[in-house]
Image (spheres, rainbow, N blue to C red):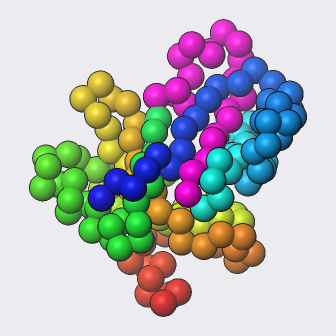
Amino acid sequence: MIKGLYEAHLPVSNIEKSIEFYQNIGLELAYKGKKVTFFWIEKGRSWLGLWECEEAQLPYHPSIRHLAFYVENEDIKKAKTWLEKREINVKEKFGFSQEQQPLVLANNPHTHAAIYFQDPDDNSLEFISPLMLDNEEAFEMMELKDWFNNHI
């Protein structure tokens, strides 16, 4: 099921300074937000999320307790069943219940399917699969089954 590490997250104290640093070492900017920015490590396969927070929060910021594993599109479709067979509960995320996952994230311009769960220490884990890169279509988050009904 797991093909690699899709994303890692780091807390940063100054998002603009960090953007400059990561561009300087050769990473391609994938998405820039007000307090969060993503860089491609390998386009379409792995990225780094940077989350701006107060320096006092740096040792405790939730971004340092999240990993996303890259999975193929065919595997994300069956990920919920795969997890349940291993007695791993899917977690509610972004207002979507366990039953509604996997879901499709509207991280314009990149579209991903994802499902969320936790390890025994409550670290946030995710299976994620890119659906479309450089997508210009705006949409709301939805269940993966609805995405495939509308895009296949």
Is residue 60 within the magenta segment? yes
Q: Compared with residue 142, is residue 17 higher up or lower down, i.e. above or below? A: above
Residue 47 showing in the rendered view: yes
The residue lying at 82 percent from left, 31 percent from top is: 21
Residue 140 showing in the rendered view: no
In this rendering, position of residue 84 left or right of residue 118: left
**Which corner quadrant of the image does residue 88 belong to?**
top left
Q: Dividing the image into 4 quarters, which one contains the N terminus? A: bottom left
The residue lying at 54 percent from left, 38 percent from top is: 8
Which residue is more in the foreground, 40 or 62? 40
In this rendering, position of residue 56 left or right of residue 113: right
Count the numbered circles shown. Answer: 0
Q: Pinpoint residue 36: horizontal percent, then vertical percent.
A: 71, 40
The range drawn in magenta is 45-65
The residue lying at 54 percent from left, 45 percent from top is: 7
Q: Pinpoint residue 150: horizontal percent, then vertical percent.
A: 50, 87
Is residue 31 within the magenta segment? no
In this rendering, position of residue 129 left or right of residue 33: left
**Which corner quadrant of the image does residue 97 belong to?**
bottom left
Q: Pinpoint residue 138: horizontal percent, then vertical percent.
A: 70, 73
Q: Pinpoint residue 90: horizontal percent, then vertical percent.
A: 28, 50
Which residue is more in the foreground, 62 or 38? 38
The residue lying at 40 percent from left, 60 percent from top is: 71
